[in-house]
Image (spheres, rainbow, N blue to C red):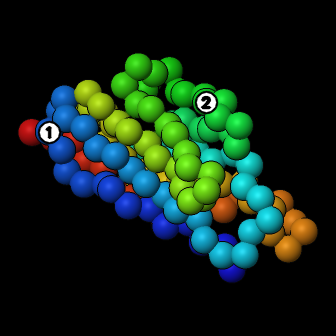
Amino acid sequence: QVQLVESGGGLVQPGGSLRLSCAASGSMFSIDVMGWYRQAPGKQRELVANITSGGITNYADSVKGRFTISRDNAKSTVYLQMNSLKPEDTAVYYCAAEITAGGVIRRYWGQGTQVTVSS
């Protein structure tokens, strides 16, 4: 069974930094796009950033220049380095990955990790 396990969330002051990690495990044939989404209270889940297996990245306008997504294909892990954090970045952050397993490709989700930016 494929699982995505996130780590790295927490409480940080405005202007601070956090690094999120998400590791995929289980019986997988391949992992295509990996990414991060977030959902703030009362708002819809939105894409933060994603990265293809070849390293092509895509960012939401609100995080460009502040967040950096990367991945280690050998470790089936995706990272999100978040700098210059703002209170409006406060949300539950979810890892997602498009994984082929058992001949079927589907999107898997992590359980979510809370990021709170507050003084």
Secondary structure at numbered mark 1: loop
Q: Residue at x 54, y 36 (%)?
A: 49
Residue at figure coordinates x 49%, y 67% from the top left:
5
Residue 13's disc number: 1
Q: Residue 82: horizontal and vertical position, in percent?
A: 34, 36
Please state which of residues 114 and 74 is positioned toward the viewer in this rendering: 74
Alpha carbons under labels 1 and 2: distance apart: 27 Å
In the rendered image, the quadrant that contains the N terminus is: bottom right
User: Does the CB distance between marks 1 and 2 fall below 8 Å?
Assistant: no
Q: Earlier in the sequence, mark 1 or mark 2?
A: 1
The residue most toward the bottom is: 1
Can residue 31 be seen at all in this image of the molecule? yes
Q: Which is nearer the eye, 2 or 87? A: 2
User: Which amino acid, by three-letter code, is at mark 2?
Assistant: Thr
Q: Residues within 10 Å of mark 1 (few under 14, many from 20)?
A: some
Q: Amino acid at mark 1?
A: Gln
